[in-house]
Amino acid sequence: MQAPDYDGPRWAIWNWRTQLIAPLRGRVLEIGCGMGPTFRHYHPSCEVWAIEKDLDRCRMALAAAQSSPARIRVQKGNAQALPFPTDFFDAVLSCLTLCSVSNPQEALGEMQRTLRPTGSCALMEHVLPLSRGGAWLAHAIQPWWSARLDGCHPNRDTAGMLERSGWQIRQCQRVACVIRGVFTPPVGQP
């Protein structure tokens, strides 16, 4: 999967999160909500289940949820073993999370399982740079980077993982080593 290059200004990447969240409606699963920086962007009609692996960040996210226009439930959880029924969500959101989970393929399988077949996955992730030099650098710094940034892998080929797993691109943009996209789940269950 080659994400199309984004030809807008580089600073526009900071607006990507808002642009991903604004169209979401219905039941939304947010994977790796951190301290809840996305919560203020949800539409009031959304019912959000936000999971976070770190208990301290869950507590901060609970406080952030109080000022959200949407109904948000925050709980400690693992993207690789989601405690939700099959076909439960209308949308899944992942912002800078798949780069940090220990098994992103399992997380994608769980996202697919809990997402309705007509649903969508909105994500913003760092990905392996396309240039040879950028890829070399991402591989070189990965051990140091991961040790200091909560297991983040700047050298993951997340776009390739989505493609190999059968996810379909509805839209996708790329700036350097970050992609933003909306994907639909593969046909059939994992």
Image (spheres, helix red, strand yellow):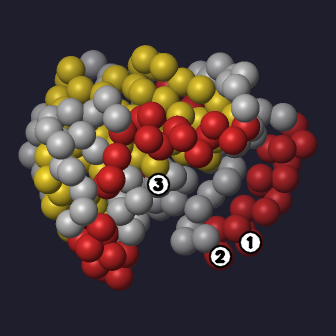
In the rendered image, residue 16, in percent from the top left (x then y), is placed at 52, 38
Mark 1 highlights which residue? 144
Q: Could you tell whether 72 is left or right of 93 in the image?
A: left
Measured in 3D between alpha carbons, the distance from the residue under mark 3 to the one under mark 2, in whole angstroms, is 15 Å
Pointer 3: residues within 10 angstroms few (<14), some, or many (20+)?
many
Is 97 or 16 nearer to us in this picture?
Answer: 16
Mark 2 highlights which residue? 148
Measured in 3D between alpha carbons, the distance from the residue under mark 1 to the one under mark 2, in whole angstroms, is 6 Å
Mark 3 highlights which residue? 97
Q: Amino acid at mark 1?
A: Trp
In the rendered image, residue 31, in percent from the top left (x then y), is placed at 34, 53
Give the residue displayed 45% in from the left and 34% down from the top: 19
Verify CB contact (< 8 Å) between mark 3 and mark 1.
no
The N terminus lies in which quarter of the figure? Answer: top right
Give the residue displayed 24% in from the left and 26% down from the top: 119
Q: Is residue 181 above or below residue 141?
A: above
In the rendered image, residue 60, in percent from the top left (x then y), is placed at 33, 76
Single out the mark in the foreground, 3 or 1: 3
* Residue 31 visible in this rendered orientation of the protein: no
